[in-house]
Amino acid sequence: MSQSKIAKLKQHLVSAVYQGHKLALETQFDCWIEGGRIEPSSKTVNGNGLLAARFYYSGVISINPCAAPAALICAFASFWLQNNGGKYDSTGIEFSADVNDDNSNEVELTIEQLCEDIELIQTGNGPLELNGKRYDFGEQSLWIAEAFTLHGEVSRA
């Protein structure tokens, strides 16, 4: 199953190494989506597939604390976008770097627009219906969380 582009870019930055050093520890990275919008579609793809919608959003990555220079982080992110971005994705990155008390930085990168295609596959009993046909998610369309926290209680009788 596929991750969102912003999650893939975050993972790229987490694993990036420059002169033998990582940009920051994995726990110092965070990413999220802002301002998402859906553009409906009903274009047939790959025979029995359907481009159901395009999901456009701004993607934000935060690194705090971060000792690596913001220019280095931006270079890694820029090259990733150039290599992996699609025709609807922004290539520009806005960034801010605020100095913390310990002289490290809080770096925030914002990509104004990323686009994810939401593709479905026609199936006999899919949960989604359009024009009398039933659809379900294909393997590449459904995003899976990188991690989650489960809270629960065990009770003994």
Image (tube, rainbow, N blue to C red):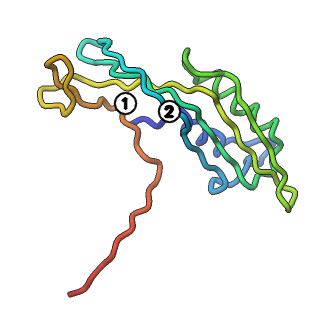
Q: Is residue 69 left or right of residue 85?
A: right
**Residue at left offset 69%, top offset 26%:** 79
Name the quadrant of the C terminus.
bottom left
Q: Position of residue 55 (x, y in %)?
A: 45, 27
**Residue at left offset 33%, top offset 32%:** 139
Look at label 2 and name its amino acid. Answer: Gly
Q: Nearer the viewer, residue 127 or 73?
A: 127
Look at label 1 and name its amino acid. Answer: Ser
Question: Please, which residue is most extreme toward the right here?
Answer: 103
Q: Position of residue 127 (x, y in %)?
A: 19, 34
Instruction: Check disc 1 and report the residue beneath it.
Output: 141
The quadrant holding residue 2 is: top left
Q: Is residue 131 left or right of residue 111?
A: left
- Label 1 sits on a secondary structure element that is loop
Q: Is 104 placed above or below 136 here?
A: below
**Cα–Cα span, label 1 and label 2:** 16 Å
Badge 1: few (under 14), some or many (20 or more) residues near its Cα, within 10 Å? some
Badge 2: few (under 14), some or many (20 or more) residues near its Cα, within 10 Å? few
Q: Is 50 placed above or below 103 here?
A: above
- Label 2 sits on a secondary structure element that is strand
Q: Is 44 placed above or below 128 here?
A: above
Q: Of discs 1 and 2, which sits in the foreground?
A: 2
Q: Is residue 62 left or right of residue 31?
A: right
- The disc placed on residue 87 is none
Q: Position of residue 132 (x, y in %)?
A: 13, 19
**Residue at left offset 82%, top offset 35%:** 71
Question: Please, which residue is most extreme toward the bottom here?
Answer: 157
Name the quadrant of the N terminus.
top left
**Residue at left offset 75%, top offset 55%:** 65
The mark that comes first in sequence, 1 or 2, is: 2
Instruction: Check disc 2 and report the residue beneath it.
Output: 36
Q: Is residue 56 left or right of residue 138?
A: right
